[in-house]
Amino acid sequence: MKLTQSTWSPFQSPEVREICGHLSAAERQELLSLARGYGQETAWRFALPFGLVAFAFFSSRPVGFALLAPFVIYCLTVERARIRAHQRRVREFLAGTQYAREHGFQSGALRLFAFPWSR
């Protein structure tokens, strides 16, 4: 089974969709590599602690509740900052592509997401 390598996202903004539709093969591979690395890092920095907290709940509710508070604080501080830093890197990468430069897209003004309910 061959996995397709797509840049599609359900809430992708029209600007990002336009840029991604005009990526060169090298730019597409670099963007996918950036996403793959972020996903792998997320697995270790978020999914693993989440799994430990979930396991603690199944083993002992008091231990699970004791680990829940530090996990939530970790998510609200460290992970939130990491997510924002990754989004900034993606914006800078997309704005630096050939198509985006030719059409005047700026990283500071580039929206990554467009939610239907926020219009």
Image (tube, helix red, strand yellow):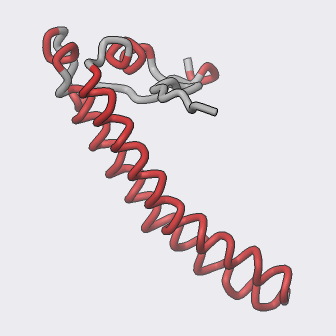
Identify the residue at the far front of this view. 1
- Is residue 47 found left or right of 110 in the rendered image? right
The residue closer to the viewer here, 2 or 65, is 2
Task: Kindly identify the residue that appears in the image at 49 percent across and 59 percent down.
Answer: 42
The residue closer to the viewer here, 27 or 93, is 27
Q: Position of residue 86 (x, y in %)?
A: 35, 48
Quarter assignment of residue 62: bottom right
Across the whole image, how many numbered discs are drawn on residues?
0
| Quadrant in the picture for the C terminus | top right
Identify the residue at the far top of this view. 103
Task: Kindly identify the residue that appears in the image at 70 percent across and 77 percent down.
Answer: 53
- Name above or below for residue 99 compared with residue 47: above
The residue closer to the viewer here, 5 or 38, is 5
Task: Kindly identify the residue that appears in the image at 50 percent across and 68 percent down.
Answer: 44
Quarter assignment of residue 115: top right
Q: Position of residue 78 (x, y in %)?
A: 43, 67
- Name above or below for residue 39 compared with residue 104: below
Q: Position of residue 21 (x, y in %)?
A: 38, 13
